[in-house]
Amino acid sequence: MALTTLQTTDPITRFPPDFVWGVATSAFQIEGAADADGKGPSIWDRFCRRPGTIADHSDGRQACQHYLRWEADLELIASLGVNAYRFSVSWPRVRPGGSGSWNEKGMAFYERLVDGLLARGIQPHLTLNHWDLPDELQAAGGWAARDTVRHFVEYAQGMAARLGDRLASITTHNEPWVISVLGYETGVFAPGIRDRAAAMQASHHLLLSHGLALQALRAEGGPAKLGIVLNLSPVHAATASLADLARARLEDGRLLRWYMDPLFKAAYPQDVVEYLGADAPQVGPGELSTIAGRLDFLGINYYARSVVSAAGPWDVHSSGREITAMGWEIYPEGLTELLLRLQRDYPLPPIYITENGAAFKDVLVNGRVHDHQRTDYIVRHIAALAEAICLGVQIEGYMVWSLLDNFEWASGYEKRFGIVHVDFQTQARTLKDSALWYRAFLQRQMAGRAGGPAPAIGA
Ligand code: FCB
């Protein structure tokens, strides 16, 4: 389908009138102000200083200077016409050591942000843990240590007590698979540990702290919907060989069932437990039923499918499909496939797509970024989402990753995911063509809302 067709023809005529349309960011990737106003160091502050960890040797000390420029950034978000903004709180900004005293200046920043969103008619969707654990807690073992669970629950309670009455949703953790596997097993992300047993114990502590935090937040009451965000993909075998199929099943277990089964079935998948052997986590009595507490929503971050081969890494070029600057294959139908599979296998709550987007080699020329590939990516994924809705999956929101070009973890500033371009020298923000498309698309969506009942999906 040509892009020109896509620009004039929306993926579907109308999404439901109360559909949540947003943009997403995370604290460490945009805020900068690494030690301003009493903020403590996070594991990412430390990790960036370790030689060889970040592709362009950069760090998050400045990032998008959002801590200073938050008000102009709120105007930017409002100008897009979204009705939701997903952001995260930097735990060491509000509680520098992870436990102990709270930092009022840090708290006040998030209060201004939330009030500023509400004043502009934008729902605040807050994530508690988007990876920047207070460094002091890492010194005591980080997520591999049981005490971190208790500290996280206290942190969740503190944030809910301060802001809970004004939030549309609270997410406990963003992508526990990434924290556990990339942080503790392969070590390519902070804290840079290579120990599979520690990784699996960390994954269990993340899930347990999620369950306990949800219990504590429910007890406090408040309007915010409570949930967790997982990075999920369909896992395909590179060939139909028995070895590849077995490998794909194991990967599906480690990526998807390892999180979905405890959350929705109060059990870890037996095949993965057996595969892990002595590296399987210690699980205390009653902990699995705590993890499986009721969710108000499940957040899903979707970027690509995963293809595995028993012989070694799969060559992403072999499918002949387009790939992004991250080297990720563009595979929108994987989103529909994933959602239908989850619907088949689990008793799902409403779903938000909390991240979806792509990095490309953007160029800013005369104040414009013609990022047609990004627009095309977003359009095709919204269409895949619409198909899942038509097939009966209850999806209530979609958020583009990301609002701004930002610090893309181990890739530094080399990979640009924003629908808004950031010049990291001047901090100038420029709407890319994808942002202009999103704004026009949302205007058409919202226009349908004003004039009586919206036509059915697919009409
Ligand atoms: C996700 C992260 C997000 C961003 C995107 C590209 O895994 O949640 O912070 O880095 O990938």
Image (cartoon, rainbow, N blue to C red):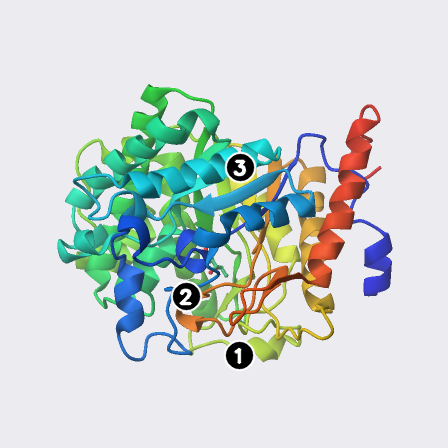
Classify mark 2 as within 8 Å of ligand 1 or not, answering yes or no. Answer: yes
Which numbered dot is residue 129?
none
Per the image, label 1 sits on a secondary structure element best described as loop
Pointer 2 with pointer 1, Cβ within 8 A:
no
Distance in Å between CA atoms under marks 3 and 1: 46 Å
Residue 43 visible in the current orientation? yes
* Horizontal and vertical percent position of residue 315: 53, 79
Check the picture and name the quadrant holding the C terminus. top right
First reached walking from the N terminus: tag 2 or tag 1: 1
| Residue occupied by mark 3 | 116
| Residue occupied by mark 1 | 315
Residue 321 appears in which quarter of the rendering?
A: bottom right
Give 195 or 146, whichever is nearer the viewer. 146
Residue type at mark 3 is Gly
Residue at 70% x, 69% y: name it.
369
Per the image, label 3 sits on a secondary structure element best described as helix
